Amino acid sequence: MTEDIRWIQRFSNFNKVLKKLSEVLKNIDLCLIGKDLSLNDVFQLEEEINSLMLAYTFDIIIHKTIDNSELLNHIERVGKSVYSKK
């Protein structure tokens, strides 16, 4: 009897972890950096991404519009460049 309860608890814990992991992996945050970016650029990028019909959601922000210092520090610390036009 106790083995069944342990198995059910382990399965429940596994499901909770899997759900959290899938939530994290489905959301991608993009921060656009450039001199002449506008909200229209964000809308255009959102349309392009949505047309791909991916299984992810994207949050897009323009770097120069961020006034939250913690978010800016986080971007500098862990952000990865995915495209750079030189």
Image (tube, grey):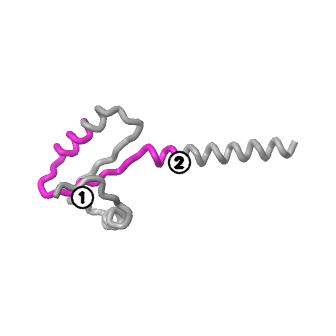
Q: Would residue 24 be counted in the magenta stretch?
A: yes
| Residue ID at (36%, 64%) | 74
- Residue 63 lies in quadrant: bottom left
Q: Quadrant of the C terminus?
A: bottom left
| Residue ID at (63%, 43%) | 15
Between the C-alphas of marks 2 and 1, the distance is: 27 Å
Q: Of label 2 and label 1, which has the lower sequence position?
A: 2
Would you place residue 55 above or below residue 20 in this image?
above
Q: Which residues are magenta?
A: 22-47
Give the amino acid at mark 1: His
Label 1 sits on residue: 63
Please tell me how crowded label 1 is: few (under 14), some (14-19), or many (20+) other residues with Cα within 10 Å.
Answer: some
In front: mark 2 or mark 1? 2
Would you place residue 2 above or below residue 65 in this image?
above
Q: Quadrant of the N terminus?
A: top right
Viewer-closest of 14 and 65: 14
- Residue 55 lies in quadrant: top left
Label 2 sits on residue: 21
Give the amino acid at mark 2: Leu
Element at label 1: helix
Q: Residue furthest right?
A: 1
Residue 10, given in percent of the width and then of the height, sits at: 72, 47
